Image: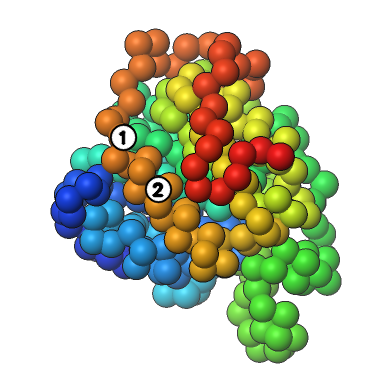
Amino acid sequence: MGSEWLRTYAQAGERPGGPGPGVRLVCFPHAGGAASAYVRLARLLGPECQVLSVQYPGRHDRRHQEPVPDIGRLADALAEEVAREVPGRYAFFGHSMGAVVAYETARRLSGHHGPDRLFLSGRGAPRGESGAHDRIHTDAELIAAAAMLGGTAADLLDDPDIREMILPALRADYRALASYAWTPGPKLDMPFTVLIGDSDPVVSVADAAAWEAFTTAPTEHRVFGGGHFYLHDGHHLDAVARLVTAGLTEPAHHPAHAGAGAEGGASGSSNDRWGGAGSAWR
């Protein structure tokens, strides 16, 4: 794939009981993260699901490009890239900041061959203003937040050279989160799978549960033991891979009234699935 935005870690194939050939999962990294954050998930899902991991500007092979400190601009660019580069059936998986970018990208693709499903991990539902944990102003606060959340090893943050490589992208990503404000619009019409760690220090189970009000389709909820980066636990990642495979095996959702209603309102019916891998809300 010659895409500037998407990196491929596994080729799609076909396996009995799998979602079938050509199914793709577009993965959106967390703040400060790179496409390589999803290498392990790609290996678990292959060969029946091809993982296309987003490489934001300002990191790894795009490190010489200026980071984009705006969620809307990221979503605009990625919607164009997905429409151009991702044929056939696909879904989105976003963790932390990546969940917001995935959701906003899906909004832009609504009605134009959008994703079959959104997997939204480690992030509460959007609000009209950014949360206090997104409003970080100094490098010291950024380093403390990264260490607290556990997304970057503490010993790497202690290394001045590595810290200087990480900080520009991290600064831009937190500026993007701090300036993000959800704007009302039609609900999406694809199913959501919402995933959260039960001891996440910045996202409560209730915050994550609120995503169900942003789609007209069913919402599935899963809680895992662990913090913000529960995905780093290999056992949990195995369970997440099974959830993704099961979600992609389901027939594409074709609602009778796509986009009905305004986003952010109360759900019209109880459409959650409570069992399965991970625990129900608790």
Residue 250's mark?
Answer: 1
Q: Is residue 234 left or right of residue 182?
A: left
Whether residue 54 is visible to the viewer of this picture, yes or no, is no
Residue at 77 percent across and 66 percent down: it is 148
Residue 31 percent coordinates (x, y): 61, 59
Disc nearer the start of the sequence (1/2) = 2
Residue found at x 44% / y 17%? 259
Q: Where is the C terminus found, in terms of image quarters?
A: top right
Tell me what residue is drawn at x 82 percent, y 47 percent: 132
Circle 1 Cα neighbour tier, 10 Å, few/some/many (<14 / 14–19 / ≥20): few
Q: Which sits in the foreground, 195 or 85?
A: 195
Q: Secondary structure at mark 1?
A: loop
Is 61 above or below relative to 212? below
Q: Which residue is mark 2?
A: 244
Answer left or right for 80 relative to 266: left
Q: Is residue 42 left or right of residue 88?
A: right
Q: Which is nearer the eye, 111 or 19? A: 19
Disc assigned to residue 63: none
Q: Is residue 199 visible?
A: yes
Between the C-alphas of marks 1 and 2, the distance is: 10 Å
Quarter of the figure with the N terminus: bottom left
Instruction: Name the side, left or right, on which 223 lies relative to 141.
Output: left
Location of residue 276 in the rendering, given as x and y in whole percent from the top left corner: 49, 42
Name the residue located 74 percent from the left edge and 43 percent from the top edge: 204
Residue 257 x/y as whole percent: 39, 10
